[in-house]
Amino acid sequence: MNYNSFYANVAYNYNFSRLDEGKVFNSTLNYIVNHLEGKNLKILDIGCGTGEYGFALKQMGYDVCGIDKSSAQVEIASKKICASIGDVLCLNKKDNSVDVILMIMMLHQIDALDLEKALAQVVRVLKPGGVVIIKTCFKDDIKKRITSKYFPSCYEFDKIRFH
């Protein structure tokens, strides 16, 4: 599956059709903020997409950088936060340099065979006592999505994405 190609096609409409808009976005943001202590935290948003979560945290005074594999998504995110093209499998960060790592709706995009390597990179860059916040979903959750109901091909695509 070519995620870069997929996100290149949806990047500019992504925020208009987000599945985590409104209440879900706010509850996730509140969860994140409730697990943060201090305003001088360095936050790395892995799979930052268009930078919506990072931008909200930046507006609250947090130091946020994001990475994403999609150049189209990074182009949009860069207008809101420090964002660059990057891959969780080879994080371009020093050891023990990040206080908080966000992995929101991106874990499913890591090949199962690479998951251990990805998490080792997360542990490497995270400061001792740091926090990792992961948000993902189960295959059963995608059946409940409105896109699955009205667009069966989306459901079939998401069954592949959410391994």
Image (cartoon, rainbow, N blue to C red):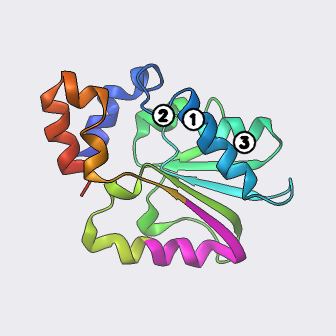
Q: Is residue 158 left or right of residue 137?
A: left
* Callout 2–callout 3 Cβ contact below 8 Å: no
- Image: 161 above or below 157: below
How far is mark 2 from mark 1, CA to CA? Answer: 5 Å
Identify residue for label 2: 20
Q: Quadrant of residue 81?
A: top right
User: Looking at the picture, how far across and down is residue 57, in whole percent?
Assistant: 72, 42
Identify residue for label 3: 57
In the rendered structure, find residue 136 and report the number of the disc placed on it: none
User: Looking at the picture, how far across and down is residue 91, in whole percent?
Assistant: 51, 66
What is the crowding at mark 1: few (fewer than 14 residues within 10 Å), some, or many (at least 20)?
Answer: some
How far is mark 2 from mark 3, CA to CA? Answer: 16 Å
Q: Nearer the viewer, mark 1 or mark 3?
A: 1
How far is mark 1 from mark 3, CA to CA? Answer: 12 Å
What is the three-letter code of the residue carrying label 2? Asp
Circle 2: element type: loop
What is the three-letter code of the residue carrying label 3? Leu
* Callout 2–callout 1 Cβ contact below 8 Å: yes
Whichever of callouts 2 and 3 sits on the residue coming sooner in the sequence is: 2
Does the magenta segment cover residue 121? yes
Circle 3: element type: helix
In the rendered structure, find residue 25 and report the number of the disc placed on it: 1
- Measuring 21% from the left and 26% from the top, which residue is drawn there? 149
